[in-house]
Image (spheres, rainbow, N blue to C red):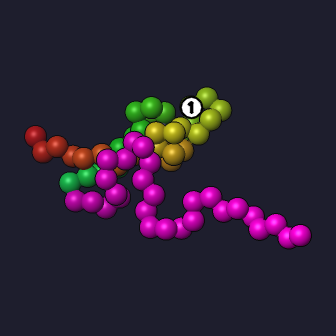
Amino acid sequence: MTSTPKDQGSSEGTKLNPGDQAEPGTPGTGENLCPDCNGSGRIGVTSCPNCGGTGKIIEGISGG
Ligand SMILES: [Zn+2]
């Protein structure tokens, strides 16, 4: 029988990482370096779960 490859995480809008506080492009928010991996996107040999391996998170910018 033919087995269909299981696609994890289909392209369905924006996927937020645990470290993200808002969707990218949200007013009042901005990209920031992931504090967990310091922007490297990895912790040791594993992808950083906080930023999903991007090394960046979306944080709310507090005005003052
Ligand atoms: Zn990270």
Check disc 1 and report the residue beneath it.
43
Note whether 57 is above or below 25 in the view shown: above
Q: For the point 56% across and 31% down, which residue is it?
A: 43
Residue 46 is one of the magenta-drawn residues: no
Residue 37 in the image: state x and y as whole percent: 48, 33
Residue 61 in the image: state x and y as whole percent: 21, 46
Residue extending furthest toward the left: 64
Q: Is residue 56 visible?
A: no
Residue extending furthest toward the front: 1
Residues rendered magenta in the picture: 1-27
Image quadrant holding the C terminus, namely top left
Q: For the point 42% across and 38% down, which residue is it?
A: 34
Note whether 57 is above or below 10 in the view shown: above
Left-right relation of 27 to 40 = left
Left-right relation of 38 to 32 = right
So how many labels did they put on this image? 1
Q: For the point 42% across and 53% down, which residue is it?
A: 16
| Amino acid marked by disc 1 | Ile
For mark 1, give the secondary structure: strand
Residue 29 in the image: state x and y as whole percent: 26, 52
Left-right relation of 37 to 24 = right
Q: Pick the residue in front: 24 or 13.
A: 13
Crowd around label 1: few <14 · some 14–19 · many ≥20 (10 Å): some
Residue extending furthest toward the top: 44
Q: Is residue 12 visible?
A: yes
Residue 16 is one of the magenta-drawn residues: yes
Left-right relation of 25 to 9 = left
Q: Is the magenta stretch mostly helix, strand or loop?
A: loop
Residue extending furthest toward the right: 1
Q: Does the residue labelled 1 lie within 8 Å of ligand 1?
A: yes
Residue 42 in the image: state x and y as whole percent: 56, 36
